[in-house]
Amino acid sequence: EVQLVESGGGLVQPGGSLRLSCEASGFTFSNYWMGWVRQAPGKGLERAASIKEDGSTKAYVDSVKGRFTISRDNAKNSLYLQMNSLRAEDTAVYYCARYGGRARFDAWGQGTLVTVSS
Amino acid sequence: QSALTQPASVSGSPGQSITISCTGTSSDVGNYNYVSWYQQHPGKAPKLLIYDVSNRPSGVPDRFSGSKSGNTASLTISGLQTEDEADYYCNSYTSSSTVVFGGGTKLTVL
């Protein structure tokens, strides 16, 4: 069974940093692109960042470029999102998702809530 | 990249059929057969319902079907059930090699 388990969310002040983690199991992690998809309270889905199987290619939504860094450790079956210079508008549930290509996010974690507030 | 356009809400009665539209441009929906649909119940993670416009992952009932015409993709749910009440999102691959989501549609089963 494919499982994705996120951790690391919480309350942080504007300008602060947070690191999200996602532990994967039930599939060959190194064979898949992975991504972070976020959802602000009461809003829709937005792909925040994604990373190629070997970590060589990364993509970000414009609003997080230069502030967020996605990375992975295939030996640990883990995905990460380092979030710096956080803003109130980054407040959201962050989902770790497996990307099967062709706009297909075919497995999702339960999500971790990030709240940016003073 | 602008979000794809979905109706904010649709409704139907049990047993009826409903269709949710997802309108993009010639740079995304209109140019690729890479449209997916997701179902999200309150407080839960999204679940993949449809991929590549009209394909269903194993385990998804055949009451759910997808199609596309021009720049608009559609999700049809036939034989509505109360448990279908949820939010539905489409997404598409784009010419910028990214993925864009729709704003979501709330389905109410009356």
Image (tube, grey):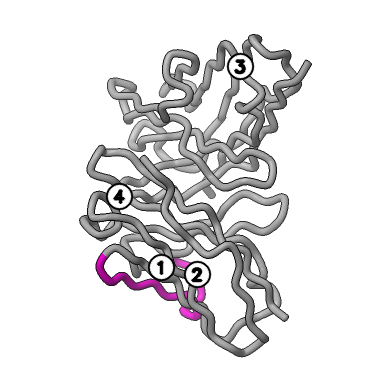
Same chain under badges 1 and 4? The reply is: no
As drawn, A61 above or below A69: below
Q: Which residue is mark 4?
A: A102
**Relative to B97, is A74 on the left or the right?**
right
C-alpha separation, residue under disc 4 versus residue under disc 2: 19 Å
Q: Is residue B67 magenta?
A: yes
Q: Chain of mark 4?
A: A
Q: Chain of mark 3?
A: A
Left or right: where B1 falls relative to B30:
right
> Circle 1 — which element?
loop
Q: Quadrant of residue B50?
A: bottom left
Is circle 4 on the same chain as circle 3? yes
Of the pair A94 and B19, the residue shown nearer to us: B19
Q: Main secondary structure of the magenta part?
A: loop
Labelled disc at residue A86: 3
Check contact, mark 2 vs mark 1: CB within 8 A: yes
Q: Residues within 10 Å of mark 4 (few under 14, many from 20)?
A: many
Badge 1 is on which residue? B56
Which residue is pictured at 73% across the width and 13% down the height?
Answer: A13
Which residue type does callout 4 highlight?
Arg
Residue B81: image location, x then y, percent:
65, 80
SS of the residue under disc 2: loop
Callout 2, which amino acid? Val
Inter-mark Cα distance, 2 to 1:
6 Å
Q: Is residue B59 magenta?
A: yes
**Residue interval drawn in magenta:** B56-70
Residue at 42% from the left image edge and 19% from the top image edge: A65
Q: Any mark on residue B60, and which?
A: 2
Q: Residues within 10 Å of mark 2 (few under 14, many from 20)?
A: some
CA separation in Å, label 4 and label 3:
30 Å
